[in-house]
Amino acid sequence: MSRQDLTTPEGLAVYLQVNYLALTCLEPVMAGHQDLLAPRLPLPEIRQDLSALGAPLPQWDERPDPGNPHPLGLIYVISGSSLGARFLYLQWAKTENISVRAAGNYLSSLKAESDWNLFLRHTSDIETDEAETLQIVRSARVGFSIFSTACEQLNRGLLGQSE
């Protein structure tokens, strides 16, 4: 996803659409773990930004089934994505494009959050057996796979538009 140029309306729209697809798929199965709350999913900010760009809200061609994932696996994926978005914010902030500037709610909302630090503190204090550890790893792979599938779907649509 970070291959998109976030300083252009097209690149930012694709980045937001991928996140929107993935997060709407994961939202129904997101849960906290013990005293660690599930990360807030900034879907309203993505909707606002896509509207500001005049880009449509994407819909899944075939929505993946996340199954019944372990909360820590998905929290790892979402918190790590938020951490990565802090660096993407720096790229986005360089834009001189007025439309892109008006669509900064999502990236701006992530630069101040500390989900990753909360995740690290929480996981340093828990003990898991081998079976639970494998479930956490499998669940993280499910989360990454859903983001990847969202990327592939949007890339198929972009390739179809350029033909």
Image (cartoon, rainbow, N blue to C red):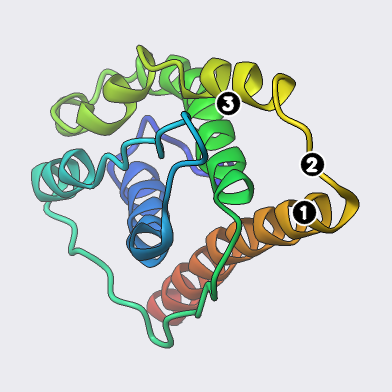
Amino acid tagged 3: Phe
Residue drawn at x 60%, y 44% is 72
How many labels, in total? 3
Residue drawn at x 23%, y 47% is 43
Amino acid tagged 1: Glu
What residue does disc 2 label?
A: 128
User: How far is mark 2 from mark 3, CA to CA?
Assistant: 15 Å
Residue 21: numbered disc: none
Q: Is residue 52 above or below residue 156?
A: above
Amino acid tagged 2: Thr
Q: Would you call the spot at circle 1 few (<14 residues within 10 Å), some (14-19), or many (20 or more)?
A: few
The front one of 135 and 148 is 135
User: How far is mark 3 from mark 1, CA to CA?
Assistant: 17 Å
Residue drawn at x 51%, y 41% is 33
User: How far is mark 1 from mark 2, CA to CA?
Assistant: 6 Å
The C terminus sits in image quarter: bottom left
- Where is residue 45? Give x, y as percent: 19, 38
The residue lying furthest to the right in this view is 130
Q: Say which quarter of the image contains residue 90.
A: top left
Q: Is residue 71 above or below residue 145?
A: above
Residue drawn at x 11%, y 53% is 54
| SS state under label 2 | loop
- Where is residue 47? Give x, y as percent: 16, 49
- Which dot, 2 or 3, sits closer to the camera? 2
- Where is residue 15? Give x, y as percent: 41, 47
Question: In the image, 106: left or right of 25?
Answer: left
Q: Are marks 1 and 2 in contact (CB under 8 Å)?
A: yes
